[in-house]
Amino acid sequence: YLRSAHEAAARFGAADINLLYVAGEPVAFAYNYAYRGNVYGLRAGYDPMFKTLGAGSALTYHMLQDSCQRGDRVLDLG
């Protein structure tokens, strides 16, 4: 199911994949669907080694900033 859902989202430009890098290494991610001004959060996580740096919070900040710049109306991060 997840593979089919991802393929459909990617085909329609609705896969919203976010990565936060520190020194060239990915430390946090979020996988969402974004379509017609609606963003639905599906999965998110971060490397526990970077917890004290607030990697998850930093990624969320940048996701919210990006969403506002796109003009999204609904953000459902679950």
Image (cartoon, grey):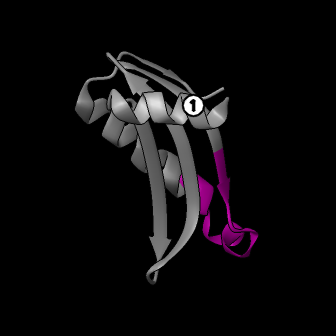
Residue 28: x %, y % from top left: 58, 61
Residue 51 falls within the magenta-colored stretch: yes
Residue 75: x %, y % from top left: 48, 23
Residue at the spot of label 1:
4
Residue 78 located left or right of residue 62 = right
- Check the image and report above or below for 54 versus 38: below
Residue 12: x %, y % from top left: 33, 26
Residue 29 located left or right of residue 78 = left
Q: Residue at x 64, y 46 (%)?
A: 44
Which amino acid, by three-letter code, is at mark 1? Answer: Ser
Q: Residue at x 45, y 28 (%)?
A: 8
- Check the image and report above or below for 25 versus 33: below
Residue 50 falls within the magenta-colored stretch: yes
Which of the pair 52/47 is nearer the observer?
A: 47
Residue reaching furthest to the right: 48
The magenta region covers: 44-57
Residue 21: x %, y % from top left: 47, 71
Element type at marker 1? helix
Q: Quadrant of residue 41?
A: top right
Q: Quadrant of residue 15?
A: top left
Q: Quadrant of the C terminus?
A: top right
Q: Residue at x 61, y 62 (%)?
A: 54
* Local crowd size for mark 1, using a 10 Å CA cut-off: few (<14), some (14–19), many (≥20): few
Residue 49 located left or right of residue 77 = right
Q: Quadrant of the N terminus?
A: top right
Q: Main secondary structure of the magenta part?
A: helix
